Image (spheres, rainbow, N blue to C red):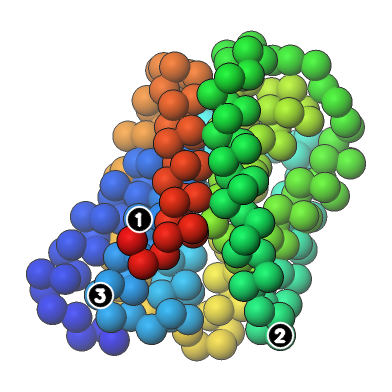
Amino acid sequence: MELLAAETWLLLVMVAALAGFVDAIAGGGGLLALPALLWAGVPPLQALATNKLQGSFGTLTATVHHLRHGELKLAALWPTVALTFCGASAGTLTVQYLPNRLLEPLIPVLLIGFALYFLFSPRVGNDDARQRIGLPAFGVLIGFGVGFYDGFFGPGTGSFFALGFVLLLGWNLRRATGGTKLLNFTSNIASLLFFAFGGHVLWLLGLSMGLAQVAGAWVGSHLVLRHGSRLIRPFLVVVCLALSAKLLYPAG
């Protein structure tokens, strides 16, 4: 599977750059990269594993960019990061024994609900709001819970993290995007490790796409910091609705 045609390889790299750009702003880059890998003829398990590899580059780039600009405080989030890693590891192991079709009818409904929330809620903007739960509870509920979901199924993970930061911690959208990238990178790495142990990762292809992800994520992260909720809010709505459509109409 490493011997893809040069044209196909180049197209996948270009898609990865676009996915990194979208992912840095609102999440959902896998909506582009994973179908492209499957279209290229990569078997599903290898496509999932390789997508985790290339996606890790983009989320790491976005995370570092937010850290450098003071949008993230790692000291406060380390427990949540650890719980996210544990959750994603558990989800990746569980998916080997349980059919993820159990989640397919539910996730599009949740994503449409999130899109409506981001579209109509006056609380979602550039200002922090009231915090509803403490960081320990957030780590268990969102860190472990969404991390488990990412390892088990995956679509919409970035949107779930973002909603958790906004709705439960009261973070503004720009700050929430930084936290989302950190937790999404963590869950990607956890899943990638288990896929790598199983020998499912196409390393050369994944690394090539990963470098393109870095470029796309760098551009997207700069735009997030410059334009804030004016850019993030519509992107979140579009990504949630696009993911819902993809899950409801997989053949479309």
Q: Residue at x 37, y 34 (%)?
A: 220
**Rendering coords of residue 199 (x, y %):** 50, 88
Give the crowd class for mark 3: few <14, some 14-19, many >=20 residues within 10 Å. some
Q: Sequence-wise, which precedes: disc 2 or disc 3?
A: 3
**Rendering coords of residue 93 (x, y %):** 70, 78
Give the crowd class for mark 1: few <14, some 14-19, many >=20 residues within 10 Å. some
Q: Sequence-wise, which precedes: disc 2 or disc 1?
A: 1
Q: Is residue 18 visible?
A: yes
Give the residue pinned by disc 3: 40
Q: Secondary structure at mark 1?
A: helix
Q: Sequence-wise, which precedes: disc 3 or disc 1?
A: 1
Q: What's the amino acid at mark 3?
A: Ala
Q: Quadrant of residue 102?
A: bottom right
**Rendering coords of residue 31 (x, y %):** 41, 55
Q: CA distance from mark 3 to mark 1?
A: 13 Å
Give the residue pinned by disc 2: 97
Quadrant showing the N terminus = bottom left
Q: Is residue 93 visible?
A: no
Q: Secondary structure at mark 2?
A: loop
**Rendering coords of residue 35 (x, y %):** 35, 65
Q: Secondary structure at mark 3?
A: loop
